[in-house]
Image (spheres, rainbow, N blue to C red):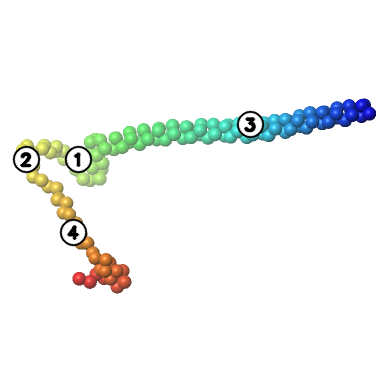
Amino acid sequence: MKQPDLLRNFFKKTLVKQLILIGLVVAAFFFLLNLNYRLSSVFTNRRTVETLQTEVVALYATDIALRTEIAEVQSEHAVEEFSREAGYIQAQDVPVAVVGIEGDLPDLSVPDEPAVTRTYENWELWMYLLFGKVFP
């Protein structure tokens, strides 16, 4: 009787060991699967970052080119050349620089008048909502 008990105990112990080993293999499989997913997302994100960095560099270059073009267009020489081509200035005209007037300058700004507001009573608002006009 001892021999079958020994065999049963041996098979029980080996079965437990095999189940533990199978569980560890399955856990390692899912761990590696998750690791593979994370690595692929890292590589995808790196490619995206590199693409975006390239686009940012291109946009900086475009910004510099546009700022240079704006500075050139706003220069005196470019304005004078455009004016001559458009016919605003004749070939014999001499540009005149206006010198500022010394002393007190008159105030040419338009004063901001406060908007006339009226507070309406509650019944006046209801009348406006119901009838579409304000009664005095």
State the residue position of label 2: 104
In the rendered image, the residue lying farthest to the left is: 103
State which quarter of the image contains the N terminus: top right
Position of 2 with respect to 132 (left or right) is: right
- Asked whether the beta carbons under mark 1 and mark 2 sit within 8 Å of each other, the answer is no
In primary-sequence order, the first of circles 4 and 1 is 1
State which quarter of the image contains the C terminus: bottom left
Say which of marks 3 and 1 sits in front: 3
State the residue position of label 3: 35
Does residue 105 sit above or below 56 in this rendering? below
Between the residue at mark 3 and the residue at mark 1, the CA separation in whole angstroms equals 76 Å
Q: Amino acid at mark 3?
A: Leu
Find residue 87 and report its image quarter: top left
Between the residue at mark 4 and the residue at mark 3, the CA separation in whole angstroms equals 70 Å
Position of 135 with respect to 12 (left or right) is: left
Between the residue at mark 1 and the residue at mark 2, the CA separation in whole angstroms equals 37 Å
The residue under the point 17% across, 54% down is 114
Q: Amino acid at mark 1?
A: Ala
Position of 43 with respect to 82 (left or right) is: right
Q: Element at badge 2? A: loop
In primary-sequence order, the first of circles 3 and 1 is 3
Q: Which mark is residue 83?
A: none
Q: Which mark is residue 116?
A: 4
Front-most of residues 84 and 2: 2
